[in-house]
Image: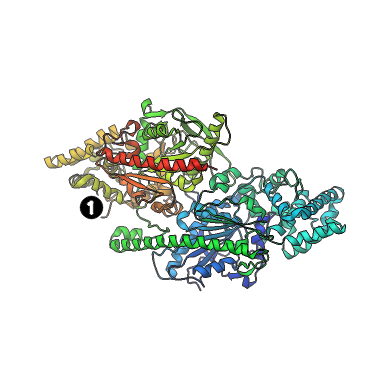
Amino acid sequence: MTTLKLVFISLLLLSVASHASLALRTQLHSLSESSNSNNYLTTQELWFNQTLDHFSPFDHHKFPQRYYEFLDYFRIPDGPIFLEICGESSCNGIVNDYISVLAKKFGAAVVSLEHRYYGRSLPFESTTTENLRYLSSKQALFDLAVFRQYYQESLNLKLNRTSVENPWFVFGGSYAGALSAWFRLKFPHLTCGSLASSAVVLAIQNFTEFDRQIGDSAGAECKAALQETTKLVEERLASNKQAVKTLFDAAELEIDGDFLYFLADAAVIAFQYGNPDRVCSTLVKAKNSGDDLVEAYAKYVKDYYLGTFGSSVQTYNQKYLKDTSLNKHTGDRLWWFQVCTEVAYFQVAPSNDSIRSSKVDTRYHLDLCKNVFGEDIYPEVDATNIYYGGTDISGSKIVFANGSQDPWRHASKQTSSPDMPSFLISCHNCGHCTDMRGCPQTPLSLEGNARNCSSPEAVEKVRHQIIEKMDLWLSECHADSWSSMRRRQQLEEEEEATEMMKLVLISTFLFFLLFSTSHAHLAPRTLLHSFSKSSTNSNRSLTSKELWFNQTLDHYSPLDHHKFQQRYYEFLDYFRVPDGPIFLKICGESSCDGIANDYIGVLAKKFGAAVVSLEHRYYGKSLPFKSTTTENLRYLSSKQALFDLAVFRQYYQESLNLKLNRTGVENPWFVFGVSYSGALSAWFRLKFPHLTCGSLASSAVVLAVYNYSEFDQQIGESAGAECKAALQETTQLVEERLASNKKAVKTLFGAAGLEIDGDFLYFLADAAAIAFQYGNPDKLCPPLVQAKKDGEDLVEVYAKYVKEYYVGNFGVSIQTYDQRHLKDTTLSENTGDRLWWFQVCTEVAYFQVAPTNDSIRSSQVDSRYHVDLCKKVFGEDIYPEVDTTNLYYGGTNIAGSKIIFTNGSQDPWRHASKQISSPDMPSFVMSCHNCGHGTDMRGCPQSPFNIEGNAKNCGSPDAVEKVRHQIIEKMDLWLSECHASGRSSM
């Protein structure tokens, strides 16, 4: 059926993965065990190459990942694509459950991706703890994003078409249900919505609610029989453990906790998967007849749990879980690794009225984790819930569905909202994933048939509600997708002849997104750099008192718990106790020496807000290492920085509560940033919406761009015809003099130390750009235009401007442009130059290259110059993963909410920002002669510093104040909504 180009690498063949000592996984295990062809829509394997570590800035290793596609119902060309997520077991095909009914109804293609490490999608040849370092839900979600883009492009190629973006919808059950919800949360631009069936979105250390639900579902008689059975087993274990274990065919379980966990799971599975009568009828009848309850339970366990259900005693044996070789039961060890590092879900006995043995406690689980994986292994439950939000997940267009008898529903979202409805299916045997699997949930009911549910009507009612939501969200998404596609096609036709677009069209990689061009040396950094240098003036800072806390070094490693010291500041003078908001001002790519007294001071006073500011990892004094070798920079990325902000936000809220002698208070938070930190502000709201009420993204460079020719085009427009012509002539003259006497011309600019011509020409280009970027065009243009009219030497006039203004007043160091300096790995006050170039060379590029025609900067400052710089400074394998960055954040098609974007009309960086407005993500442009980078927060000019962002020197103060008024209106609305809901945080 497929003509896709397949990538297939031979692997050690594995049989179906079994379930672990976690009832959560048994659903997928039992279904995958059934190889009956009727149980699958397809079992034809397909393969593609997946990135091994999505969160490393320089590790480009790949591994082969297995997937499936089913196109029988697909409505070409505009039908939706359903992505069914495979969870914690071998994925042997696309199961013929209720998704086939939905696919037929909606004319959808169905694709399914096997979870990394499980089944045949194996990155390594053994499962040592060290080899499992890339096994996590966070890596798995990024896998899905990469696969989604790969498959869309492959489908377009197969159907001989380009630029088509089908509406996508994501499905998953249990852990895969959590992945489905989390995918929509973290990658909303890549799917129209998701169905999160029995989605265990809350990581829990002590999951006592699990057993309580089993007791409720069992009813009084069955519960009493189960409790008495557990008590009798414990007594017999004390007197003759070998005999009682042998009775259950479980003599190999030497650790009593393993055996008692096995017995507890055997009971659980009946309620979880819609077969409660299998255990209850057996035990209640034995109890009423005076039969031996232990023997009756042993018969049930052997006949049903080990027999019909197909579980294995070996699954519960810690000796077996320590086996790192690949075999058909490897999945048990893999899932326990995720349990022991991310989610816990420790099914422990409640303090009172428990069904399972009290010996299955927290200590048992923690000891298992250490025994199987190593002393430093434990579940980072708090970090997981900070990352995803737990049951306070703050996504949109996610349907949650749970069965009334399912013990896992207490780790799912059960409160409903218009954009995240949660449906409970109530019936005697409605358990885990009833909406997709029918009743019982195992063995498989073809097409999720609900006729054997005790209330088929309850199931069908919820399915009808699911279809209504899907119909609505797919229709909305489809309209947006196709109008977006048509706009893209028009642009392609108009620009097809230009060399620039030929470069861009090499890779179409994002949903709703065109990959455009990019820039490099960091004019966005100069803003923050210059302000931090002037922060010693006390009037310019709200505070400069340093505070410190311990930050996690690698948020994305399940193994590494190292910390480093991170610097922050707080300002409480305007704070309205107890319910005032907290403004988090993000420091970007420079040393953070205090909280600048710009327009945030005005806003804090107006809203009664506390202001806190966190220094970016690696910059200033927040140094994880004593040198900046490329290897030591492996944790420097925007993704790590965003997680830093989330952890700090939680730490500060708790610290503030402690300081104010209170508990349980969650203040509304609002996030601010300018330039790169403006992008971080937008991305923080995108990735952690449960932790902030909204964000202001000032001059936010959210689009990673490889060849950023628009930068120079904007400089030309801002300069005007006369100044532009003078700048172009100056560049031409400099190039001529470089060819004849390069030492003389470099010395004229005080830049004889820049041996590489590209470095020198970049320095000159930045010197011009900065005048427009930061609201000082008259420092440059009038003298240069007049010199041209008077027939003066343009190069000498420009050199005077560069030395007096750019190097003198503005404070830029020529050393910043010297690649020899950038290669220096020792720590100094200028280390930030190397750090930012590392981020440029690995994540965002922003290569400010000369446009093909009518350029201001020298054509020698091209892509090759930038790529060579990256390799020379950091190593041969270093290059910017622009496509990956835009895939992760969405570029200018960012699909967040409650984000304000602002840009100055003369700012060349605005073309890497979001300039299209929507009700929930307004975008405002301040138009005036000197409205540049961060004008809304900094006033005019943007350098030197203006106290409280004074706008009186802006070409149009009214334009700035109008945008500020709109910002205040949005902040007031969003803070009020957040405050009222009490959901500024988890």
Residue 190, x across and y down, in percent: 46, 57
Q: Is residue 485 left or right of residue 639?
A: left
Observer-nearest of 173 and 436: 436
Considering only vertical position in the picture, is 859 above or below 947? below
* Foreground pick, 628 / 478: 478
- Where does residue 952 sit, x and y in percent of width and height? 27, 34
- Residue located 46% across and 38% down the image: 618
Q: Could you tell me which residue is drawn at 47 percent across and 36 percent down? A: 581
On the image, the x and y values in percent for residue 149 come to: 46, 60
Q: Is residue 570 left or right of residue 15?
A: left
| Count of picture labels | 1
Figure quadrant of the C terminus: top right
* Residue 832 in sight here: yes
Say whether residue 335 is left or right of residue 633. Answer: right
Q: Amino acid at mark 1?
A: Asp
In the displayed structure, would residue 61 be above or below residue 548? below
Q: Residue 512: horizontal and vertical position, in percent?
A: 40, 58
Question: Circle 1: is it few (<14), some (14-19), or many (20+) Cα within 10 Å?
Answer: few
Image point 31% across, 57% down: which residue? 500
Q: Which residue is under mark 1?
A: 854
Compared across the picture, whether 386 is left or right of 259 comes to: left
- Residue 672 against residue 23 in the figure, above or below: above
Q: Quadrant of residue 673?
A: top left
Q: Is any part of residue 64 visible from this angle?
A: no
